[in-house]
Image (cartoon, rainbow, N blue to C red):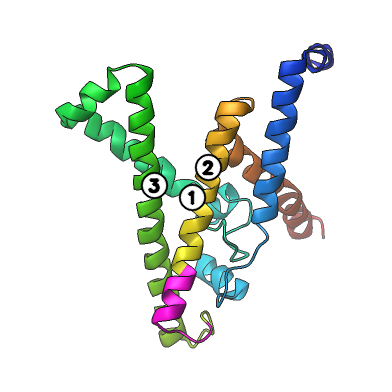
Amino acid sequence: MLQTLKNAWKIPDLRRRILFTLMMLIVFRFGAHIPVPYLTADAMQAFLGNGGTDLFDVFTGGAFSNATVMAMGVSPYINASIIVQLLTVAIPSLERLAKEGLEGRKKINKITRYLGIALAFIQGAGLYVTLYNMSVTNGLDAIKNPSVLTFFVIVLTFTAGTAFIIWLGELITEKGLGNGVSLIIFAGIVSRIPSAAYGIYNQFLG
């Protein structure tokens, strides 16, 4: 294994791709620590404890529970990919695009990208409404100064975070090593290993 890595490192193109991929993943992790305006991390953690899924937080590398701009992760893009694949079978024009080779796949990827961003906006809006209702019913100070402006700031920040992740994933796929979206998901999961190990230690051995 180590010898294979050493041999790969000696190849200039592979070395460049590895370094580029690592740099993009570092940028992703940096973005996972930028907070969303008007939103508190306590609110997101309360949402997880109120029926939210910890697995989703694992896939985002803790960005969701920390209420950061990357909180939506790549889930809207993955959902968009599934929807487009299903529509490719049902809609003849999309089926023709899928059979047009590289140019057709580029157009389908463009449709998937825009649909993913639209789904991110819808998902962010749904999350805002949920947190607002939690504030009203449970007295949780989830959203600071709730208003129409606050709604758009929070939802558009979530949407921009997802759009940025999609862009990073496409850059990694094009100029890096491997599938960008898969590597971003992997990086998020790996980043949660230390905190998960610490939690297990405290629960069973602490």
Is 150 within the magenta? yes
Q: Which residue is mark 2?
A: 167
- Residue type highlighted by circle 3: Gly
Helix, strand or loop status at disc 1: helix
Residue range of the region highlighted in magenta in the rendering: 144-154
Q: Could you tell which of marks 3 and 2 lies nearer the N-terminus?
A: 3
- Residue type highlighted by circle 2: Trp
In the rendered image of this protein, does residue 80 appear above or below residue 96?
below
Residue 88 seen in the current view: yes
- Residue type highlighted by circle 1: Ala
The crowd level at tag 3 (other Cα within 10 Å; few <14, some 14-19, many 20+) is many
Helix, strand or loop status at disc 2: helix
Q: Could you tell which of marks 1 and 3 lies nearer the N-terminus?
A: 3
In the rendered image of this protein, does residue 184 appear above or below residue 144?
above
Q: Which residue is mark 1?
A: 163
Q: Which residue is mark 3?
A: 116
